[in-house]
Image (tube, helix red, strand yellow):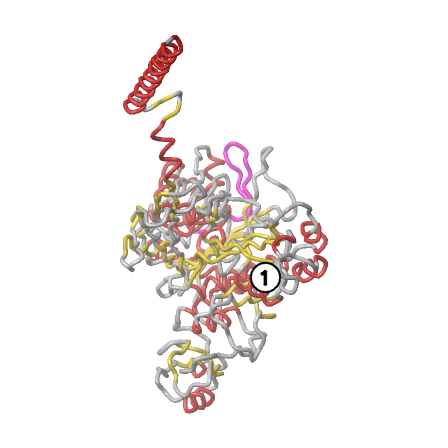
Amino acid sequence: MKGSNTLKYNLKITMILVAIIFIIIIYKLIVVSVSENVDGINLQSFASNRNTAQKTIYASRGSIYYSNGEVLATDTNSYTVIAYLSPKRTTDEKNPQHVKDKENTATLLSEILNRDKQTLLELLNRENLYQIELKRGITESDKNAIMALDLPGIDFIKSVKRYYPNARYASYILGYAKANDEGEINGEMGLEYYYNDILKGKNGSITYQKDAYGYQIPNTPAYEEESEKGKSIYLTLNQDIQHVLENAIYGLEENYAFDWATLSIMNAKTGEILGSASSPNFDLNTRDDLTTYLNPLISYQYEPGSVMKIFSFMAAIENGIYDGNKMFKSGSIVLSDGTKINDFNNVGWGEINYDTGFAYSSNVAATNLGLELGAQKLRTFYETLGFGKSTGIDLPGEGDGKITFNYESEIATASFGQGLTITAIQMLQALSTLANDGVMVKPYIVSKIVDENGNNVLENKRTEVANVASKETINKVKELMYKVVYDGFSYNKAYAPNNVSLIGKTGTAQIANPKGGYLKGEYDYIKSFAGLFPYEDPEYIVFISIKQLVGGTNDIAKIVNNVVLETAKTLNLVSNNTDVDQTKIIALSDYISKNVAITTDELKRLGLKPIVLGDGKYIINQYPINNQNVLVGSKVFILTNDTTYKMPDVIGWSTNEIISFCNLLGINYELNGYGIVKSVSVSSGDIIDKSNILVINLEK
């Protein structure tokens, strides 16, 4: 009996304990069900992080184009080269899946990857690693070249990077964009930075339930928010004109030492920047030679020198105090405070009139006019021309310049472009008054912005900023500028091209010394030239400025002459006083759908050089296009109705010719250097693979 009672007692105790435990469990469940936090853990967040995952879907970035639709900046596939080092990857010795012959692998990869063989070998000899990265950001063509080597253990990780086909062209205008560690591409400079939000589009995402390994659980729902592709930007830049300017700057770099240079062409009627090149510039794809983030076109602020006489004389004419026939004593003038102002040759040209004073760039003439105007009138006129404030062009980092002057000596120097600072873009804007009967137009570089459906979301056009001077004043200033080029010093006549009439004004400015005064070295000047063409009705502005050019002053005229000559050809300008033999200018016909053999014979009879692409019987496209003027001896590209195309012998072709060829065939290309074609990545006679990038090496 006693044992039975003990058993009953133990059973009761056990039941009581079970009941207590059950009550505790129920209590805990109630607490969990009504509370977000238990033991300091947010259960909702914990469950969410454990069971769901979210992946960002990065939007495709919009492209940037020339005015004709050719690509300046776009997204392209990029690859990281990796090497598998672990022997565990190989299960069949006849088919190795890791790097076995490290010496040979390093040797073969070093040339393609442009990396030192010893560096690669050290990476391949690293111990206790499953895989290692050899190089990031290689191109599709380099990837294909490596794949052709069939090296065991070499693989690729695909990603997207920003690609610039022309490498160095318009580098400070375009700026650059690059991917961050998460793979998102953002602009860091130039237009890429200024319009980053428009170009980058809107990222999407996908949210899904994941298993313990992070993979999506099969047959479970997923929520996807689609990405929106970025909008694309079309610039005002003319592809052919940009090539001409870049080649001009490259020639300057090859032959002379200088600090910086900028060279631009603007449509004076509309404000469109048709081309702008500068030195320094940099390779947009590598950025290895990027030394400054300042854009020479808009950010460099400097004293302009005698090109400013265009506007001080304009102010005097507009204010009714100018008499071109009035005589004055050139050479030097002493101001009331004792300051002596000299003409650039220190002795002058004796008694001359003010029209001649402008042609000879007399500082004394400008000083006399500036003092008669007074500080307020001269400063107000400069301000109306836009000096002293930014133009508002859609590029980051634009400078304002400074036009503060009050005292007699300051008025004098301001009249011939010293003691004040401007930017090149301000000069282009101010010069537009000479093409619009005194109306100044705002410069712009973005023509339009379009969405992925081709709809315009922004379209820029001519914007009038101010009415600065009368038509009569402008006509007089143009007359004075004509005399500079055609009736002034003999060396100024070198500026005049033989196919269009050019008006202009030279400038030589001293460079301010940070310690006070001006630098005194032989080459411590900023040389410049401001011109418009054609003289009969100016449509286009050319402006060049170069700091501390060592020698080569006369070559500035040659550069301007050639740039204007080539630009006039590109724009089909014909002046009344042209010296070009009109019998050598040919207006092309429309050859599309015509027989190839018959068309080729006709082009040869005209003195042209047909470049036939493909072995088709009929023509499906041509360049130059119908009605475009070309000179005898020019190449005419004929695209036939073939399915494959062989690489012609392009060695010695000009930059414009090789790019026209690529555009006609739809080939992606990469330019290295400037000038004529030295070599290309596809041999003459080989079939062209349009999926690969054609690498073009140029030389002067």
From the top left corner, tell me how far across and down residue 101 is, in percent.
70, 59
Q: Left of 520 or right of it: where is 75? A: left
Q: 282 or 8, which lies in front?
A: 8
Q: 81 or 91, which lies in front?
A: 91
Q: Is residue 239 above or below residue 285?
A: below
Q: Residue placed at 42% from the left, 49% from the top?
A: 191
Q: Residue placed at 40% from the left, 82% from the top?
A: 641
Q: Residue placed at 29% from the left, 53% from the top?
A: 458
The number of callouts visible is 1
Q: Which residues are magenta?
A: 327-343
For the C terminus, the quadrant is bottom right
Residue closest to the far front: 1
Q: Which residue is mark 1?
A: 251
**Looking at the rendering, which quadrant does residue 683 occupy?**
bottom right
Q: Secondary structure at mark 1?
A: helix
Is residue 165 a member of the stretch shown in magenta?
A: no
Residue 506 visible in the picture: no
From the top left corner, tell me how far across and down residue 445 is, in percent.
38, 54
Q: Residues within 10 Å of mark 1 (few under 14, many from 20)?
A: some
From the top left corner, tell me how far across and down residue 477 is, in percent.
39, 55
Q: Is residue 293 above or below residue 106?
A: above
From the top left corner, tell me how far across and down residue 192 is, in percent.
43, 49
For the N terminus, the quadrant is top left
Residue 221 visible in the picture: yes
Dot 1 amino acid type: Gly
